[in-house]
Image: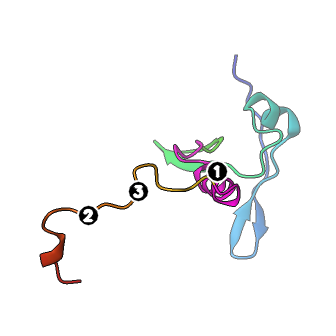
Amino acid sequence: MQHVIHITLRAVGNSKGIVLPKPILAQAGLADAARVELTVENGAIILRRPVASVRAGWEEAAEHIARQGEDALVMGEFGNEDDAGLIW
């Protein structure tokens, strides 16, 4: 069952802001969120937990591998037959 809560829009500079009640944040799974994804769908403002990037953490993992010295080429350097004719 949906409960309707009326809240006040507050002036924040040239914009408007709202304070979201803690129980509403908890119900939406946003109680501990520092950032949210905001969209407008069919005239409604929607807040969601951000979807993690498919490559989230890759940069840190690559840096860790490099620090461990485990980033050597597996197959070594090799060229292609036509590379000599290329102008860079």
Query: Label 1 crowding class (10 Å Cα cut-off): few <14, some 14-19, many 20+?
Result: few
Residue labelled with disc 1: 61
Give the left or right position of residue 60, taking residue 9 as reference. left
The part of the chain drawn in magenta is: 51-69
**Is 68 placed left or right of 58 in the picture?**
right
Check disc 3 and report the residue beneath it. Answer: 76
Q: How many marks?
A: 3
Q: Position of residue 76 (x, y in %)?
A: 41, 56
Vertical placement of residue 51 versus 64, above or below: above
Q: Identify the residue at image location x=63%, y=59%.
A: 66
- Secondary element at tag 1: helix
Tell me the number on the disc at residue 25.
none
Instruction: Tell me if residue 10 is in the magenta stretch.
Output: no
Query: Which quarter of the rendering shows the C terminus?
Result: bottom left
Amino acid type indicated by mark 2: Gly
The residue depicted at 77 percent of the width and 28 percent of the height is: 27
